[in-house]
Image (cartoon, grey):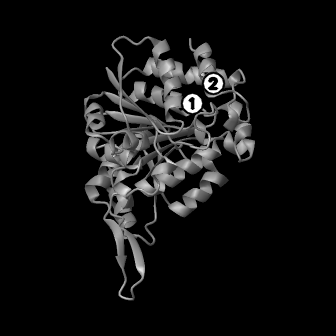
Amino acid sequence: MLIALFPGDGIGPEIVAQAKRVLDALAIPGLTYEEGLVGGAAYKAVGHPLPPETLDLARRADAILFGAVGDPDCDSLERHLRPEQAILGLRKELGLFSNLRPAKVFPELADASALKQEVASAIDLLIVRETNGDVYFGEKGMRKTPEGLREGYDIMSYNEEEVRKIAHQGFQAARARRGKLCSVDKANVLETSQLWRDVVIEVSADYPDVALSHMYVDNAAMQLVRNPGQFDVIVTGNMFGDILSDQASMCVGSIGMLASATLNDSNQGLYEPIHGSAPDIAGQGKANPLATVLSAGMMLRYSLNLADQADRIEAAVARALADGARSFDLGGTMSTVEMGDAVLAALV
């Protein structure tokens, strides 16, 4: 079992190192690693954010453990050379279309949420986000209007097969959880969303045991704050899912706690924390590694079929938090390495 390690930029190397320590402690037979360059680190080394060698490693690997990309030094580069193109390129080249972002409040962190404790404590949801289409991958560019004004454009589009694939993912996830699926769109104003809603309804015929509801994205954003406990599984498009999953992270207390998986048809996956590279704290030992550690747990569960080992990681994180482990983003003073130490001490 080959794991590709792509630490990337900013705090990426620090948090991936802690996740690898936890994986090593599990002593899983046959687990091997190779490391590759991505993002700004890759651009500075070889002139491209996703070098051919990195892409080759990604294709050979059973799964990818990803840190973060983003480097202010690269902000002035042409768009196709910016660090963020690494993650978009990997999604496209590997067919990684289904992003799973769980959001659940650890009881010990209910008071860390910006929401009232009784509201935050009810959060246990999964956002299933399509990641290979939508406005991020549509035609885009800059042009001049007839009046000579500069105009930027980004085209949002989905075809019915793209929607059908992610809808099945959403329904299957809901079937494995509490049997409720909320499809989020903006069908009242967007033709793309009208197609989305129509196709999701068509797919629902295959899942009579799952209760389907629909919600406009602006209302969904409001409901995540007002009554997040109503949600089980949310399925939505690329841009809406990007925004709502970040919002959900703060509802549970910190963006440093949310893991994610992005899978293709063969369950090869890219696993990463949902936060960015945080260049303002890079190299200071302040980053919370728990989202990356939990992403490694998702990797064991979804791509390597090692559910028991994934359970051990999740239990160790919960135990470390129950014992008082707190990084800076959680109101504590423990360093990145100390948080890793706490998880290792709790690993049984």
Q: Is residue 203 left or right of residue 213?
A: left
Contact between labelled residues 2 and 1, with CB atoms less than 8 Å apart: yes
Q: Amino acid at mark 1?
A: Pro
Which residue is more in the foreground, 115 or 269?
A: 269
Image coords of residue 152 (percent x, y): 40, 72
Image coords of residue 54 (percent x, y): 30, 35
Quadrant for residue 302, please give it.
top left
Residue 335 higher or lower than 282, as above or below = above
Nearer-N-terminus badge (1/2): 1
Identify the residue shown where x is 61% and y is 58%: 222
Query: Which quarter shows the N terminus?
Result: top left
Which residue is more in the foreground, 76 or 254?
A: 76
Q: Is residue 182 visible?
A: no
Image coords of residue 139 (percent x, y): 31, 65
Residue 212 higher or lower than 176, as above or below = below
Query: Which quarter shows the C terminus?
Result: top right
Identify the residue shown where x is 50% and y is 35%: 12
Q: Amino acid at mark 2?
A: Met
Q: Residues within 10 Å of mark 1 (few under 14, many from 20)?
A: many
Identify the residue shown where x is 51% and y is 61%: 217
Q: Which residue is mark 1?
A: 289
Residue 76 higher or lower than 206, as above or below = below
Which residue is more in the foreground, 335 or 3?
A: 335
Q: Which residue is mark 2?
A: 339
Task: Indicate the secondary structure of the residue bearing disc 2.
Answer: helix
Q: Is residue 302 left or right of residue 51?
A: right
